[in-house]
Image (cartoon, helix red, strand yellow):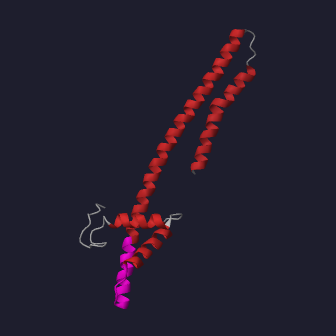
Amino acid sequence: MYVMCRNSWMWFLVFVFALPTMAFAAEATATSPMQDVLTNLMQLAALVLAGLVAWAVKLVMAKFKIEISAEQEAVVRKVARDGIYFAEEWGAKQLKLGDRAVAGSDKLAQATSFMLAKVPGLDPDAAQKAIHAVLGSLQGLGASKASGTPSGE
């Protein structure tokens, strides 16, 4: 979708600036030196204006990319929290079935596989980093079981 949007902006710029400039240059039949100078100045002004518009579009696209990235980060944090809860439930079920505690590494593997299933294209290392980051904010979970700050969610 981003590529299609970027291509749409390029076509917009071509139709708004390049085609009229080319048509103006093709139609201009200068008869005096002053008209030649004015024609060249108009073409230069159109080129500069097109560059400024392209620069402004680039800035706007960069801003939207940042907002999309923040939104994606929020989704990853939510899926990491859900993966932690999933792993805790899985560990509790394993404890009831086998009467033995599940190792933290097994819970981490379960939470990581949960995240990788929910967020396609996510790197396993990035998933584990997200899990560790969210784990510190969940009260009653993690290494200390007592420390942790309320997540506010």
Q: Is residue 54 left or right of residue 90?
A: right
Pick the residue in front: 104 or 53.
104
Q: Which picture quadrant has residue 102? A: bottom left
Viewer-side residue, 19 vs 87: 87
* Residue located 41% across and 64% down the image: 130
Look at the image and say whether residue 95 sits in the magenta stretch.
yes
> What residue is drawn where x is 37% and y is 77%?
104
Determine the main secondary structure of the stretch shown in magenta.
Answer: helix
- Whether 152 is among the magenta residues is no
Can you tell which quarter of the image residue 14 is in?
A: top right
Q: Percent from the top left, x then y, of residue 28?
A: 73, 18
Q: Is residue 44 above or below residue 31?
A: below
Report the quarter where the C terminus lies: bottom left
Would residue 24 be found to the left or right of residue 79 on screen? right
**Residue 38's image quarter?**
top right
Q: Is residue 99 above or below residue 1?
A: below
Read off the magenta span. Answer: 84-103
Judged from this view, the residue extending furthest toward the left is 146
Number of numbered discs overlaid on the protein picture? 0
